[in-house]
Image (tube, helix red, strand yellow):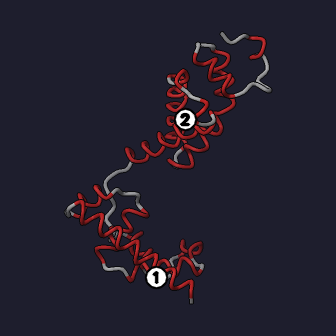
Amino acid sequence: MVTKRWISSDEGVSDEALLAGIAVGDDEAGLIFVRRYQRRLYGLAVGIVGDAGDAEDVAQEAFLRIFRHAQVFDVRRGAVSTWALTITRNLAIDATRVRRGVPTDPQDRVFVELTSGQHQPDAAALANDSAASARSAIAALPIEQRRAVVLAALYGRTAAEIAEVEGIALGTAKSRIRLGMAKLRHSLVNEEAQ
């Protein structure tokens, strides 16, 4: 059992010791652990999900999982901080996927702006050479590959989701993504060489 003597001050208390305290039901160890990690877990979550309310939910779920599985943590497999942040990252990615609405049609305004050479008012941040090179490389792709690459790289869609949206076979979706990315890479490497 974790004693209150070392819990009274969290200075010098290792994360492993706190997790061991949590595993045996020490509430003070849990409180110190939460205080130590709440900003990091919330910060990571908000960086991924982009919404404060959703990030709070993700961080809370991460703490619940950490507390629930504290007894199975193995220090030989990595640091407590890495384990806690990985749990949070995975939950945040899952929350983003669940929250994702109907797939956006690549012909919408965002897609047109990405492939257009025209400068939009909000495109000032993209005005550097690398953005222009990327935009022209994307525009040079065949439309099927362009749609697949944009859906995968910018919208985070999986090959299965792209296959469903486009009404094509999964293998075809994978091929379009792979070929499109290879052509982009080749185009951008050639541009840098010049």
Q: Foreground residue, 123 or 164?
A: 164
Q: Is residue 134 left or right of residue 144?
A: right
Where is residue 156 drawn, in percent x and y?
A: 41, 57
Q: Which residue position is annotated with label 2? A: 59
In percent of width and height, residue 116 lies at 43, 80
Is 126 situated above or below 62? below
Residue 187's tag is 1
Q: Badge 1, how many Cα within 10 Å: few under 14, some, many 20+?
A: some
In what element is the residue under mark 1?
helix
Amino acid under label 2?
Answer: Ala
Are dots 2 and 1 in contact, CB under 8 Å?
Answer: no
Q: Is residue 119 left or right of residue 21?
A: left
Q: Is residue 83 above or below residue 180?
A: above
Residue 53 % position (x, y): 52, 39
Give the farthest residue toward the front. Answer: 76
Q: In this view of the protein, which residue sits in the foreground, 48 or 101?
A: 48
Q: Residue at x 74, y 11 (%)?
A: 4
Q: What count of labels does the image hold?
A: 2
Q: Residue at x 40, y 81 (%)?
A: 139
Q: In the rendered structure, which disc, 2 or 1, sits on the residue that comes first in sequence?
A: 2
